[in-house]
């Protein structure tokens, strides 16, 4: 039974011959090992930074497991992503210090500025917006991390200017 969708986006790894070949290579090398699903998903995540729905369906078909099994592993472990990351990862700290000093207002403002919800990537694939729990910069709360840069004592009004540095 073929479970592949009829429409696969042209930038999906399955549609790029070299990337599909790499997927098949990983499946061939690891597919028969105990715990193969977790191992394969981890290797694909490292290689492609996400595991798209077409990739999930392809893996289910090739491994002979239900799609729900693949999806269950991906949603159980927070390190897996089902959509590609943007060029810049914007993480709003919602640890205790950041939360009480205005972290939630930063979330609202960034969602407005980027026109995405947390966990999503902008259509131009420039930014991915995420929540994190503590970056260890509590004295600078509230904190936003952009890639590996820590921006402290952030005002919602300053966020647009801060983002422009990454465009």
Image (cartoon, rainbow, N blue to C red):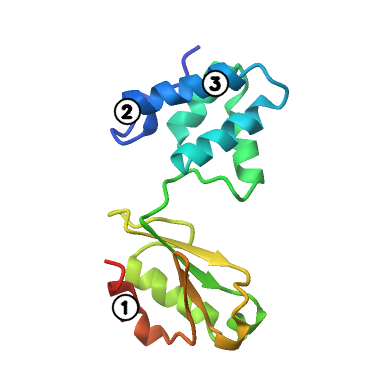
Q: CA distance from mark 1 to mark 3?
A: 43 Å
| Residue occupying the point 66% across, 45% down | 76
Q: Earlier along the polypeptide chain: callout 2 or callout 1?
A: 2
Q: Residue beneath label 3, please?
A: 27
Please identify the quarter of the rendering in which residue 90 is found.
bottom left
Q: Earlier along the polypeptide chain: callout 1 or callout 3?
A: 3
Q: Residue beneath label 1, please?
A: 160
Question: Of all residues shown, which one is farthest toward the top?
Answer: 1
Task: Identify the secondary structure beneath mark 3.
Answer: helix
> In which quadrant is the C terminus drawn?
bottom left
Vertical relation: 149 (above or below) 157: above
| Residue occupying the point 40% across, 69% down | 111
Percent of width and height locating residue 107:
47, 73
Q: CA distance from mark 2 to mark 3?
A: 16 Å
Using a 10 Å C-alpha cutoff, classify the residue at mark 2 as few (fewer than 14 neighbours), some (14 to 19) or many (20 or more): few
Vertical relation: 52 (above or below) 162: above
- The residue lying toward the viewer, choosing from 7 and 124, is 124
Mark 1 or mark 3, whichever is nearer to me: 3
Percent of width and height locating residue 136:
63, 76
Percent of width and height locating residue 115:
34, 65
Task: Identify the secondary structure beneath mark 1.
Answer: helix
Q: Residue beneath label 2, please?
A: 16
Question: Of all residues shown, which one is farthest toward the right?
Answer: 34
Report if residue 51 is visible in the image.
Answer: no
């Amino acid at each position: 039974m073929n479970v592949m969708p009829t429409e696969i986006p042209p930038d999906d790894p399955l549609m790029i011959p070299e990337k599909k070949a790499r997927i098949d290579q990983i499946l061939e090398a690891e597919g028969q090992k105990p715990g193969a699903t977790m191992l394969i998903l981890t290797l694909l995540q490292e290689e492609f930074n996400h595991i798209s729905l077409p990739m999930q369906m392809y893996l289910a078909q090739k491994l002979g497991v239900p799609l729900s099994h693949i999806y269950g592993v991906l949603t159980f472990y927070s390190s897996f992503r089902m959509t590609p990351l943007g060029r810049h990862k914007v993480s709003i700290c919602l640890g205790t210090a950041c939360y009480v000093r205005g972290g939630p207002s930063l979330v609202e403002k960034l969602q407005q500025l980027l026109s995405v919800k947390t966990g999503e990537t902008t259509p131009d694939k420039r930014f991915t917006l995420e929540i994190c729990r503590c970056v260890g910069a509590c004295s600078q709360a509230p904190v936003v991390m952009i890639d590996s840069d820590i921006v402290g004592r952030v005002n919602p009004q300053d966020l647009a200017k801060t983002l422009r540095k990454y465009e």
